[in-house]
Amino acid sequence: MNKPSQAKIKIIDGGVTSACGFIAGGVKAGIKVTKKTDLALLYSEKPCTAAGAFTTNAIRASSVDWCENRLPSKTIQAILVNSGCANACTGDQGVKDSSMMALLASKTVDIDHDSVLIASTGVIGKALPIDKVEKALPKLKKGLSADGGTAFATAIMTTDLVKKESAVKVSSGKVSYTIGGCCKGSGMIHPNMATMLAFVTTDAAITPSNLDKIVKRTVNRTFNNLTVDGDTSTNDMIHVLANGMSGVKVTTAADLAVFEEALFTVCNDLCKKIAADGEGATKRVEINVCGAATENDARKAAKSVANSNLTKCALFGNDPNWGRIACAVGYSGAKFSNEKMNINLCGVPVFQNLQPVAFDAIKLHKLMKEKIVSIDIDLGVGKAKAIAHTCDFSYDYVKINADYHT
């Protein structure tokens, strides 16, 4: 690649099979009682450099341990995912079933056992019906294709209402590479990884060490600033696979910076889609914090507002209650200037110098009915910034989670 100023990042249609050399698919294995597709497989023609990030919940599914023990790596070639059963809190049997999932997948596509990553999502405490997984794998293999990204993205869904995919093409001169991904997530979403599974692929070539560093920084800037309901799951993870089949090597500092920004673009877009599809949500909320002393302070303030249930309830009611936003910033631990800190809601100034700014409440109430609501906060003490994503809290959130039992 050339200098960053010459590289272009273009958003394109696509998902996990947009990059060269990746095929995928999804089938009905009978794991979900809904009878919808529930088993998905992603495969690369060549072994991949791979890295990931994982839930911070101390109670975690064995699939998380399986993957974390193998990453970063330069030999990953497939990912098998099931939905409808989290295979979490299932003891020794759950550990055996996770290993068996990887073994069955490895035999299906004829690769090494340790070259397979796995993921599960669904109800906690139920044993994985491994016999159904085994029975469905031949059909799943037969259906793998370069057009199967959407089928993969659909099969990993649980309470999601829509599939979530994103992709970009990075070009510089005559060379280019693609990064594409998909995710699932709608509820039990909270900073530090949530009930969120994300899978990203690229045909660029990058070392395991560089990929690992970039993935962890990107997750901190995106998925770790995402919240729906404040619950951190037992199963969440993100995997990024790079097979190098574009022929483009990402090695220099300039190339790595462009790659990181492109990965951020895909992951941030996936975060937006999770927030928009939050269980019972009527709107997506984007919190932009600038003027922070450090990036960590910016994240603290953004995540504090995103996680404020009082703020999220006010957003559902289209109530311009800026006091709840200011309160969340105040207890976030982020440094701010009493004289310079200000808050804009839907682009309307509402708070400055620790006092209200006069605004048209009726007009702002109408603006808050839009599908995307922005909260912009300037802490007034520096140049660092961060973004967080969330949604409002509605009556339907309670209904969904009172009845949830896949």
Image (tube, rainbow, N blue to C red):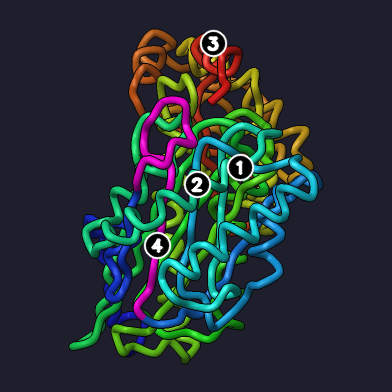
Q: Provide the residue designation for mark 3.
A: 399
Query: CB of mark 3 within 8 Å of CB of mark 4?
Result: no
Residue 392 visible (yes or no): yes
Query: CB of mark 2 within 8 Å of CB of mark 1?
Result: yes
Q: Which mark is residue 42?
A: 4
Where is residue 314? Give x, y as percent.
55, 14
Amino acid bearing label 2: Asn
Q: Which residues are magenta?
A: 27-45
Q: Provide the residue designation for mark 2.
A: 82
Earlier sequence position, callout 2 versus callout 3: 2
Which residue is drawn at the image coordinates 44% and 76% (left, top)?
110
When asked about the image quadrant of residue 242, the answer is bottom left
Query: Around disc 1, counting alpha carbons within 10 Å, would you say few (fewer than 14), some (14 to 19), or many (20 or more)?
Result: many
Measure the C-alpha gap from mark 2 to mark 1.
9 Å
Residue 380 visible (yes or no): no
* 326 over 130 or under it: above or below: above
